[in-house]
Amino acid sequence: MSENTKNSETVKEPVMSALRTLAVERKGLEALSEAIADGLGKPFSQALEVIRGITGRVIVTGVGKSGHIGSKIAATLASTGTPAFFVHPAEANHGDLGMIARDDAIVTMSWSGETRELGGILSYSRRFEIPLIAITAGVESTLARQADIVLALPKAEEACPHGLAPTTSTLMQLALGDALAVALLESRGFSASDFHTFHPGGKLGASLMKVSEIMHTGDRVPLVEAGTSMRNAIMRISEKGFGCVGVIDRDARLCGIITDGDLRRHIDADLLSMSVDEVMTRSPKTIEGDTLVASALKIVNTSSITALMVVSDGKPVGIVHLHDLLRVGAA
């Protein structure tokens, strides 16, 4: 066998393994989708109504890989408008049951439904009549018998060749949790601005930030009145450092803008003897304060400009520079 053939086989084997894994997991998701369209749809809707009806939080719990999935589901719920957090069953048995209140609801993750560590939480939920939602494939399990609502996962083949490592099963748990979170999000009319409230950090948070949150205001805004000499306008451009100056009329409305580019285009003329009215660009690009930072960046890029005047009812209330947009991570 040639060296090239060996290398080809070396690459081919892991690729085929990956494709087999994805094929098996895809079948699991297809089975879950069919289950929701069939018998699982009713308890899914009931779980949605229970969570919407509580005044407390959603407590998600689970052990092992189910616990890791549960932690992610709790985070997704919390970031999409449903107050939630994860409680580890072992910690719950040693004092953290006190974190769970009567007005909460509990979502318990266990593929088999026979996880012994869940015993304390199950007893606690029954004692204080806290709604208990089970996500499990063990429809006849201890967990299923204790739960108020059972979201029964269909049996599925694990992608692991030994059928042991949780792969397809955890993917199905995660997908069902995501489906529940999105259904809750949609039922509440949760908007992009609401999402930003809970997710101000990172590129995603930056893209949902409003221009009003980062714009320069007050004396920082470079403005001159119509009729101002270009000598004074240039001084204002230099003073404010945005590479431009806005021109306002007698009603304080923005009627034009002068940029560094305008200065270069008039360099051969007797620029200093001219007024801003002769040089300014009329009807300049503007935005409003509630414009998303991501949208502002798109305008700046497509228009090949470096700054945007922010207006309200035609009157300038701020200015945002390309550097401001890049600094908050909107790119």
Image (tube, grey):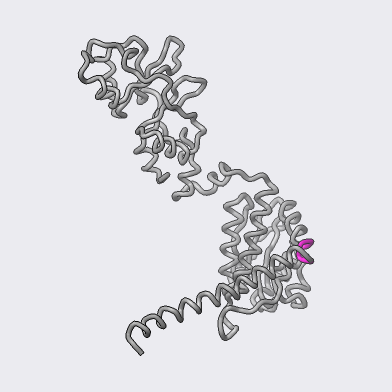
Taking the image as shown, residue 187 lies to the left or right of residue 9, namely: right
Q: Confirm whether residue 94 shows in the render.
A: no
Q: Quadrant of residue 235?
A: top left
- In the image, residue 191 sits, relative to residue 260, either above or below, namely below
- Give coordinates of residue 115: x percent, y percent: 66, 77
* Residue 27 is a magenta residue: no
Taking the image as shown, residue 145 lies to the left or right of residue 98, namely: right
Q: Residue at 49%, 20% (x, y): give it.
A: 314
- In the image, residue 292 sits, relative to residue 233, either above or below, namely below
- Give coordinates of residue 242: x percent, y percent: 31, 29
User: Magenta region, mostly helix, strand or loop?
Assistant: helix
- In the image, residue 117 sits, relative to residue 219, either above or below, namely below
Residue interval drawn in magenta: 39-43
* Residue 42 is a magenta residue: yes
Taking the image as shown, residue 30 lies to the left or right of residue 259, namely: right
Q: Quadrant of the N terminus?
A: bottom left
- In the image, residue 83 sits, relative to residue 36, either above or below, namely above
Q: Nearer the viewer, residue 323 or 146?
A: 323
Q: Residue at 56%, 81% (x, y): give it.
A: 160
Q: Confirm whether residue 91 shows in the render.
A: yes
Q: Nearer the viewer, residue 21 or 204?
A: 21
- Give coordinates of residue 298: x percent, y percent: 44, 39
